[in-house]
Image (cartoon, grey):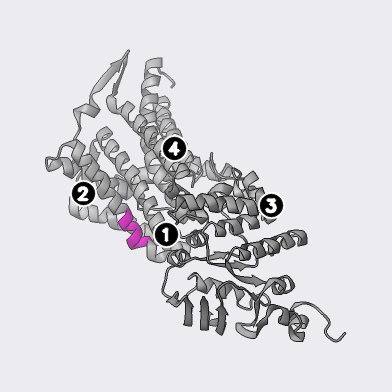
Amino acid sequence: MLKIDNLVVAYGGIEALKGINLEVEEGKIVTLVGANGAGKSTTLRSVVGLVKPKSGSITYNNIDLLNMKTQDIVKLGITLVPEGRRIFPNLTVLENLKLGAYFRKDTNEIKKDLEWVYSLFPILKERHWQMAGTLSGGEQQMLAVGRALMSKPKLLMMDEPSLGLAPIIVNELFNIIKEIHNQGVTILLIEQNANAALHIADIGYVIETGMIKIKGEGKELLNNDEVRKAYLGENVSN
Amino acid sequence: MINMTWEMFLQHLANGISLGSLYALIAIGYTMVYGILRLINFAHGDIFMMATYFAFFGVFFGLPWYIAFPITIILTILLGMGVEIAAYRSLRDAPKISIMISAIGASFLIENLAIVIFGGRPKAFPTEELFTKVVYIGNISVQRLTFIIPIVTIILLVMLLYLINKTKTGMAMRAVSKDHETAKLMGVNIDRTISTTFGIGSALAAIGGIMWGLKFPQIQPLMGVMPGLKCFIAAVIGGIGNITGAVIGGFFLGVSEIMLVAIFQGLTGYRDAFAFIILILVLLFKPTGIMGEKISEKV
């Protein structure tokens, strides 16, 4: 579905990605884990055209994404839930959701999707008239995910959705991610919370300073000594 | 010093309100562009000036006003969008100071082009009996225009607020004003949204320009400078970025300017300075303006 080949991204001479390869198969949950500054966000931002790569290729169902504008990439069914939620605080909850469906013309389907989002996140329905800036952090993250779903994505990419959330809400969120996946949405998930991410992922990639270090099945990586030591904070010797 | 009858007061008030309405129309353009690009569009006053010339030449070449004025509005919209594409678009990711200097450059360019093309000598704006006819109410004599201007302004304001708050385009504009990148992720075409904003601001400046020409029927290439600055001040008074605020600021500035001159006739020469004194006071004591947003966000 999504194929990244030998992608190099540089910010003013410093290479943030040094030629990474990554593949997301349709129907899978793929996760990209790694430390701060490893290049996780840059990878996702390149896919949606917010960052212009220096070299390499990104294709989606064999469509070259590199020279496309963000607004057109989104129309292909690729949506990014950006890091830090980035909801529109000056718009109501409902307006934020409607904006997610901005480019869609199928009014009736939009209504159905709105109901679906409301069923996933009942709190959003309750607060649909509120300014989004007044929501709590967890609710804002729900709104950011709901807003992304309103574009009817085939590939949903999430950048650190658990950042700054209480553990109980993180659990809830990961359950909802699984639920969304069950509805047939392919998911590419970036997480610092490697443990939670690898538990739900089919495939995991570990990225370190701009390079893919390890690739494997989610469960397999959970048991990988190197991963456990570096990302799961476990003492491997015992 | 204060020597004014009730009739005179009402007369001045009517004048102040109509001047304030014109300020309001132009101030909306400043505030909208600021809202979406965080840029003071210094060329806005000159776009207003160009509108008066478009109208002048339309009538000059024999078009009736009801054709000349709509053409004026269209040409002004194109000019406003053209300035954005030529002077601001390529600088969107550049430091703020670059785009500000570009705005000042665009302003000087338009002013000097106007001097070269139209000549520096003032021209008489064609007056239309329909608008300028004087009507008497009791002892007060006012031009019809004095009533038409505020009514037109209020109607345009209501239409604009509807567009911003109730339509999809308006929703996109509000989204872009907060976060360009995320708006792009929603599939919003940023360039088109910004273009629309400049178009709307320029249309309002054109309508303001036409009515300005009818009210003060003498036009010249630098006529946009002082109203431009004052309307920017009006936008700041109202809380820059806020449309209703810009209108309130415009009315406030127009009425107080006229009243100041009417009450303290010795201060007539300081009329223009007054606006700047208010600007300084606002910046000192309430930098967010009357309607300025107090942003409270949970993170």
- Looking at this view, is B270 or B230 the one in front? B230
Q: Which residue is mark 3?
A: A136
Q: From the top left corner, tell me how far across and down residue B33 is, in percent.
A: 42, 51
Quick one: label 1 or label 4, which is nearer the N terminus?
Answer: 1
Question: Of the residues shown, which amino acid type is indicated by label 2?
Answer: Gly
Considering depth in this image, is A111 or B106 the residue closer to the camera?
A111
Q: Is residue A199 left or right of residue B186?
A: right
Q: Residue at x 42, y 25 (%)?
A: B263
Query: At 32% across and 52% down in the image, what residue appears?
Result: B80
Task: Evaluate if marks 3 and 1 touch, with contact meaning CB atoms under 8 Å apart.
Answer: no
Question: What distance separates the C-alpha of mark 1 from that of mark 4?
Answer: 28 Å
Disc 2 is placed on an element classified as loop
Please tell me whether the stretch drawn in magenta is mainly helix, strand or loop: helix
Disc 3, SS? loop
Q: Secondary structure at mark 1?
A: loop
- Chain letter, disc 2 residue: B
Q: CA distance from mark 4 to mark 2?
A: 31 Å
The lab-note entry on whether marks 1 and 2 share a chain reads: yes
Any magenta on residue B124?
no
Residue B189: mark: 1
Name the mark on residue B247. 4
For label 4, count other residues whose C-alpha is less than 10 Å away and answer few (under 14), some (14-19) or many (20+): many
Which of the 4 image quadrants contains residue A196?
bottom right
Mark 1 is surrounded, within 10 Å at the Cα level, by few (under 14), some (14 to 19) or many (20 or more) other residues, namely some
Labels 4 and 2 positioned on one and the same chain:
yes
The residue at which mark 2 appears reads as: B120
Q: CA distance from mark 1 to mark 2?
A: 41 Å
Q: Position of residue A101 (x, y in %)?
A: 49, 55
Image location of residue A59, percent across then percent down:
47, 77
Vertical order, B234 against B149 (above or below): below
